[in-house]
Amino acid sequence: MLRGDIICWIGKINSNYQKRRHLDWIEKFGSYMRAENDAHESMPSKYADRLGKRSSSTPFIYRESEILRIMDGFGSLGIHHPYDVATYRTIVGLIASTGMRLGEALSLCKADFKELELLIRKGKFGKDRLLYVQSTTGQALREYLEARPATLDSSKIFVIHTNRTPASCTVQAAFRRCTNYVGVDGREGSGPPRIHDLRHTFAVNSLRDCSSDERSVSNHIVALSTYLGHVSVSDTYWYLRLLPETKLMIAKAISEPQHAQ
């Protein structure tokens, strides 16, 4: 189907919402094809712009040094119990190294962790999936569990000193306090850093490190979609669209010297 035919077909759809969905899908597919071969066309922005701006903003892409500063910063926030500090720090480290959602991390039970495997039960839309983690991530998680006070007997992996898992809003609030404290601010084109942006950073870095040949890109997109727990592989195409739009920010974040601060 030619581009003009596609635009004509979408123009017959009455709902702007449905038009936006179809245009987004075509734009994502075009980004995917262009990642394999620059000769492929992409959707001209003028068509999507007629329907207004997308609601999603550009995510904050973290430097490795910023993630480490945030993890270290929890110890300086005046948090009441040292194990709570370890809990917040380990949650951030796990999300950064696996790209899992915050809710998925908070739902993990100790029985879901075996060697270098994490079982995500009933993730988004009720999907289960198995994550394989790096040895350093597995070791950090084991050390966190081994340091747990004997009085805390919850079956959950992440708990605070009250023997319960912290609420998502509590973790997000502590994360925001920590980013403010260590001076990690939004860069041009992005909003303030969020804990969910650790997931975006994982995905972007994964695609950045992927080989550029057609087979590697195709296989990597499918594998990344499964690993992140996306409902459809088309959801993962969004990161290919994100890469060129934020290439200067990402290149700066990744290539700058990682000075300790």
Image (spheres, rainbow, N blue to C red):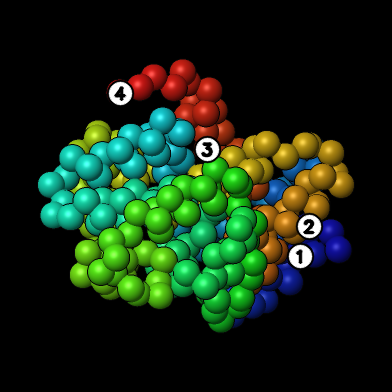
Q: Residues within 10 Å of mark 1 (few under 14, many from 20)?
A: few
What residue is shown at x 64% (from left), y 67% (from top)? 130
Q: Which mark is residue 246?
A: 3
- Farthest residue, direction front: 150
What residue is shown at x 61% (from left), y 75% (from top)? 128
- Give percent across and percent down for residue 33: 78, 49
Q: Inspect this view and state whether residue 45 appears.
A: no
Which three-letter amino acid code belongs to the residue tagged 2? Answer: Arg
Which three-letter amino acid code belongs to the residue tagged 3? Answer: Thr
Q: Which mark is residue 6?
A: 1
Whichever of labels 4 and 1 marks the residue nearer the N terminus, that label is: 1
Cα–Cα gap, marks 4 and 1: 52 Å
What residue is shown at x 44% (from left), y 38% (from top)? 62
- Give percent across and percent down for residue 162: 21, 70
Whichever of labels 2 and 4 marks the residue nearer the N terminus, that label is: 2
**Camera-side mark, 3 or 1:** 3
Q: Relative to residue 224, is residue 213 depicted above or below?
A: above
Q: Which residue is mark 2?
A: 3
Q: Which residue is mark 4?
A: 261
The one nearer the camera, 146 or 35, is 146
**Camera-side mark, 2 or 3:** 3
Question: Element at badge 2?
Answer: helix
Whichever of labels 3 and 1 marks the residue nearer the N terminus, that label is: 1
